[in-house]
């Protein structure tokens, strides 16, 4: 009764997550079934832009950034996926814009005017640029035009002195002593302000005289990004995968959340349902006692560290694999020039069941469980698996499966709120 109750709880949990996923997809207008159009853009720098950042076309959100790659000339190739095709014309503009002062970016695309010459994307590469933030631009303008600002203030002071002395048309028109006295006081104030500015006193004086101010303003912006940027730029991927093992007659279904606080590491939090068949090579309690099938729900929690080299990603994943201590090694390989259908090779190892006394599962293995498999990305959301398990044993078996992954904005927003609340 205990294990039947656990199985029922596991089934209800899985069904609930699947229904949540279906609801999320439904309210997002079934985006996964729409056509997608990919465009490659070359930038000199990407200013901290992240995978899955938004792409706007003439202000309308139409897609996401799906891939970034450093080129041999140190420029950055960015691949964006749009839900609608876009025609580009001479005079087009593509830029990376700041979403807010606390971090986050998006790609803005202006395709150009249709009365201009159309861009042939088979012959010409799209190029983009970074839009300088307001604080950086203010610091740069003040730093580059210090002399002009000083001259402007000096000229203004000279004009006011002439007016005070009654020179010129305006000076002659102003005969009233009270007006003269006001102008004189104003002139003296301006003279005092000018002297303070020249000596670097006050906010405006520092703006003009301090050559490091633009760097300070930039540092202020960077400090805000350091505090809020990692939370705002966090990516969350919801995943469902199912694998079938031939000899074990086992169906393993996994639901997980991959949380990317940084491009070079992520947390994988989830659970795996192990549905064993009584005719397979694995022994378990119900098979031994009642000759029945049985399902177990096991934790799947890993911390992944990623390393990129020449557009190849290497990932090291220690943690719990199907409820047992283990480790996984992934090697992601771009098999086309655009990386559209990347291939990943994986080696996984975990402690075998029945390695300790009184476990409910006996995998009949000599040592740990080892498996190796390949993954092919069929599309933006679907992957296909094939490989071998129970390696280094006489009854090694083949297995295959499919997975679905989806960048869930609602769950990301929830995690962002939790992060900010800290």
Image (cartoon, rainbow, N blue to C red):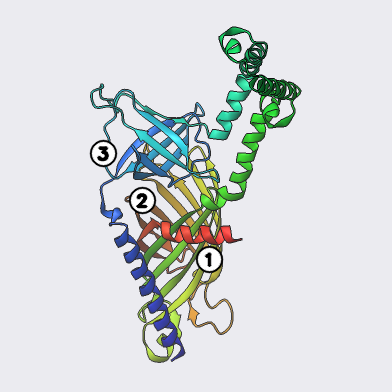
- Marks 2 and 3, how far apart at CA: 22 Å
Q: Which one is in front, 115 or 177?
A: 177
Residue 62: horizontal and vertical position, in percent?
Answer: 33, 44
- Give the residue number, with chain letter if any, for mark 1: 301
- Which residue is painted at 76% across and 23% down in the image? 199
| Quarter placement of the N terminus | bottom left
Residue reaching furthest right? 199
- Give the number of the disc on residue 377: 2
Could you tell me residue 171's position as x and y percent? 61, 12
For discs 1 and 3, the disc positioned in front in the rendered view: 3
- At horizontal 37% and vertical 65% (from top left) the residue drawn is 243
Vertical comparison of 10 with 415: above or below: below
- Say which residue label 3 marks: 85
> Looking at the image, is 375 positioned above or below residue 311?
below
- Neighbor class of circle 3 (other Cα within 10 Å; few <14, some 14-19, many 20+) is few
Q: Is residue 295 above or below residue 73?
A: below
């Amino acid at each position: 009764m205990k294990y039947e109750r656990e199985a029922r709880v596991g089934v209800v949990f899985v069904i609930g997550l699947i229904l949540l996923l279906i609801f999320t997809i439904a309210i997002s207008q079934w985006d996964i079934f729409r056509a997608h159009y990919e465009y490659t853009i070359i930038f000199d720098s990407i200013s901290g832009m992240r995978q899955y950042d938004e792409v706007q076309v003439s202000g309308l959100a139409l897609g996401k950034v799906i891939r970034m790659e450093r080129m041999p000339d140190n420029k950055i190739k960015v691949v964006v996926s749009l839900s609608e095709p876009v025609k580009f014309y001479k005079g087009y503009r593509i830029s990376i814009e700041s979403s807010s002062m606390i971090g986050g970016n998006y790609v803005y695309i202006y395709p150009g005017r249709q009365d201009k010459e159309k861009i042939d994307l088979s012959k010409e590469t799209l190029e983009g640029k970074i839009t300088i933030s307001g604080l950086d631009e203010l610091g740069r303008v003040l730093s580059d035009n210090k002399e002009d600002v000083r001259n402007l203030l000096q000229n203004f002071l000279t004009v006011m002195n002439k007016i005070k002395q009654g020179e010129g048309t305006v000076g002659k028109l102003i005969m009233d002593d009270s007006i003269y006295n006001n102008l004189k006081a104003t002139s003296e104030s301006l003279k005092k302000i000018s002297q303070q500015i020249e000596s670097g006193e006050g906010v405006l004086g520092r703006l003009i005289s301090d050559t490091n101010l633009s760097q300070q303003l930039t540092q202020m912006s960077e400090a805000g990004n350091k505090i809020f940027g990692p939370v705002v730029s966090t990516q969350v991927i919801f995943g469902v995968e199912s694998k079938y093992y031939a000899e074990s007659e086992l169906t393993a279904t996994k639901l997980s959340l991959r949380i990317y606080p940084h491009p070079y590491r992520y947390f994988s939090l989830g659970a795996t349902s192990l549905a064993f068949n009584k005719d397979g090579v694995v022994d378990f309690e119900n098979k031994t006692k009642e000759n029945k099938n049985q399902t177990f729900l096991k934790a799947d929690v890993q911390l992944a560290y990623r390393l990129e080299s020449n557009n190849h990603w290497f990932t090291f994943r220690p943690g719990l694999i199907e409820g047992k201590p283990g480790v996984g090694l992934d090697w992601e390989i771009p098999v086309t020039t655009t990386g559209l259908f990347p291939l990943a090779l994986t080696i996984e190892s975990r402690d075998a069941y029945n390695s300790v006394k009184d476990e409910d599962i006996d995998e009949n293995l000599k040592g740990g469980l080892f498996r190796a498999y390949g993954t092919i990305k069929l599309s933006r959301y679907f992957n296909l698996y094939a490989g071998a398990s129970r390696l280094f044993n006489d009854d090694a078996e083949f297995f295959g499966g499919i997975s679905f992954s989806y960048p869930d904005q609602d769950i990301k927003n929830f995690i962002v709120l939790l992060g900010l609340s800290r």
